[in-house]
Image (spheres, helix red, strand yellow):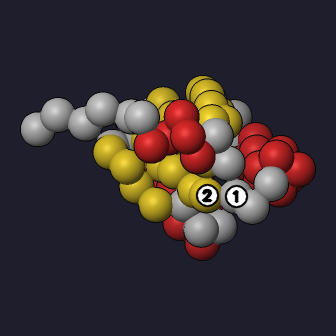
Amino acid sequence: MWTLVMFDLPTDDDIAKKNYTAFRKRLLTSGYAMMQYSVYMRHHASRENAETHAKRVMKALPPDGEVRILKITDKQFSMMEVFF
């Protein structure tokens, strides 16, 4: 199972920038990889593991931020179309 974390965080002042950086670093240290700007992905061995990590992401979210978490199967992930 794959988890995609998509987020919008303000960066209009120094505190907001620090919160953005801390959130992004938290994703990276939790095993997420940047798929594109503000979209990170991680593979999980099970749905339960994906749920656990989703809860951790929500706890790390800064107060003025917005996050969306999408969980998809390996088969769905493999059908993703990418264009350059």
Question: Which residue is drawn at the image coordinates 88% and 50% (left, top)?
Answer: 48
Query: Dot 2 surroundings within 10 Å: few (below 14), some, or many (20 or more)?
Result: some
Residue 34 falls in image quadrant: bottom left
Q: Kindly identify which numbered label has been placed on residue 62.
A: none
User: In the rendered view, would you say 75 is above or below 33?
Assistant: above
Residue 71 falls in image quadrant: top right
What is the x, y in percent for residue 15? 52, 48
Quarter holding the C terminus is top left
What is the x, y in percent for residue 41? 52, 51
Relative side of 56 to 29, left or right: right
- Name the residue nearer the viewer: 10 or 27: 27
Query: Dot 1 surroundings within 10 Å: few (below 14), some, or many (20 or more)?
Result: some
Which residue in the structure is indicated by mark 2? Answer: 43
Residue sitting at the far bottom: 29
Residue 29 falls in image quadrant: bottom right
- Name the residue nearer the viewer: 81 or 61: 81
User: In the rendered view, would you say 10 is above or below 49?
Assistant: above
- Name the residue nearer the viewer: 72 or 10: 72
Mark 2 residue element = strand
Q: Which kind of residue does numbered mark 1 sit on? A: His
Q: Which kind of residue does numbered mark 2 sit on? A: His
One can see residue 5 in this view: no
What is the x, y in percent for residue 79? 42, 35
Tell me if label 1 and label 2 are in contact, CB under 8 Å: yes
Question: Which residue is drawn at the image coordinates 53% and 66% (left, top)?
Answer: 28
Relative side of 50 to 71, left or right: right
Q: Kindly identify which numbered label has been placed on residue 44.
A: 1
Question: Which residue is drawn at the image coordinates 63% and 36% (left, top)?
Answer: 72
Mark 1 residue element = loop
